[in-house]
Amino acid sequence: MNKAQLFEQIKNKRSFLCVGLDPVLENIPKHLLKYDNPVLEFNKQIIDATKDLCVAYKPNTAFFESMGLKGWESLIRTWEYMPKDIFSIADAKRGDIGNTSAMYADAFFNESKSQMSFDAITVAPYMGKDSVGPFLSYKDKWVILLALTSNAGHSDFQLHSTPQGMLYEEVIRISSEWADSGQLMYVVGATRGAEFENIRRLAPDNFLLVPGIGAQGGSLAEVCKYGLNKECGLLVNSARSIIYAGNGPDFAEKAREEALKLQQEMEQILLSAGLI
Ligand SMILES: O=C(O)c1cc(=O)[nH]c(=O)n1[C@@H]1O[C@H](COP(=O)(O)O)[C@@H](O)[C@H]1O
């Protein structure tokens, strides 16, 4: 999916919500345990309940990898089940020397090898251009580079001063020479609302993947104040606050109610900004 198609979807659905699919077997409703693959059933029902309200799904691969063979199967089947007009993000946070990154890229982009072909993957920038390049060589796919993350530990490295500015600013400045805003997005945590003005100066046209709304306490209004651009430019992710809104037989309806609240808030923001 290209940038224009993503923006079209945002306008049509009046939403820039990304639903995080981070299933934990112990937390999913007990009545699903009778299914052969409870995690897959959980994901399918969440997708059915939210697909008209969100523009992206982001399974975090850790939640699948931790379940071994069955987990990989759940990830593949979940990807297959996602409507293909919805942006799909493999939140895998990969990055290694070039020939290894090429294998990671195949793992999430090359359907003929791995049975999955996500639209985007999250990538750690730490190892530099030759580690990110193999992901970018898939020209119709997106790389979402970690810039300023939502966790407390972001200050350990990302806020360190360099002669040119903070390290996360360098990540954005340097990486923006590797690909344009049609292929490169950045992760910026919602918990860093005040930094969005600065980030938009460095990356005016890139989409930003913004996790940290909901369970981590980030504010949608604060993110949007400076984060919106002329093509919306934001994919705001929430996982736990949506997928675990309920844990009884009506969990999917509860998830929908939470997603709807966010979609309605987003609709007002898009209207106020004159984007719809
Ligand atoms: O890359 C990410 O998605 C990510 C980056 C970041 O800085 N913070 C962050 O929370 N995430 C992911 O976003 C999701 C947040 O989930 P909730 O806090 O449950 O909404 C998890 O899958 C995290 O791994």
Image (tube, rainbow, N blue to C red):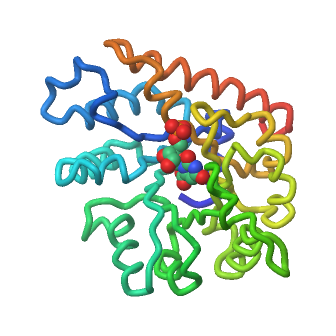
Q: Residue at x 49, y 32 (%)?
A: 240
Residue 191, position in %: x, y? 70, 43
How many numbered marks have been drawn onto this rendered protein structure?
0
- Looking at the image, which residue is at 63% across and 67% down? 184
Query: Based on the displayed image, in which of its 4 quarters is residue 251 positioned?
Result: top left
Q: Is residue 203 left or right of residue 244?
A: right
Q: Say if residue 86 shows up in the picture.
A: no
187 sits left or right of 115 in the view: right
Q: Is residue 183 visible?
A: yes
Q: Which corner quadrant holds the C terminus? A: top right
Q: Residue at x 60, y 66 (%)?
A: 145
Query: In the figure, 127 relative to 65: above or below?
Result: below
**Where is 26 relative to 245, above or below?**
below
Toward the viewer: 145 or 80?
145
Q: Is residue 270 above or below residue 112?
A: above
Image position of 256 (left or right of 266)? left
Residue 260 quadrant: top right
Q: Residue 53 in the image: x percent, y percent? A: 55, 30
| Left/right of residue 149 with respect to residue 229 in the rendered view | left
In the depicted structure, whether residue 263 falls above or below residue 197: above
- Residue found at the very far front of the displayed protein: 156
Across and down, in percent, residue 270 comes to 78, 35
Look at 24% across and 19% down and name the residue there: 30
Residue 194's x, y, as percent?
Answer: 83, 47
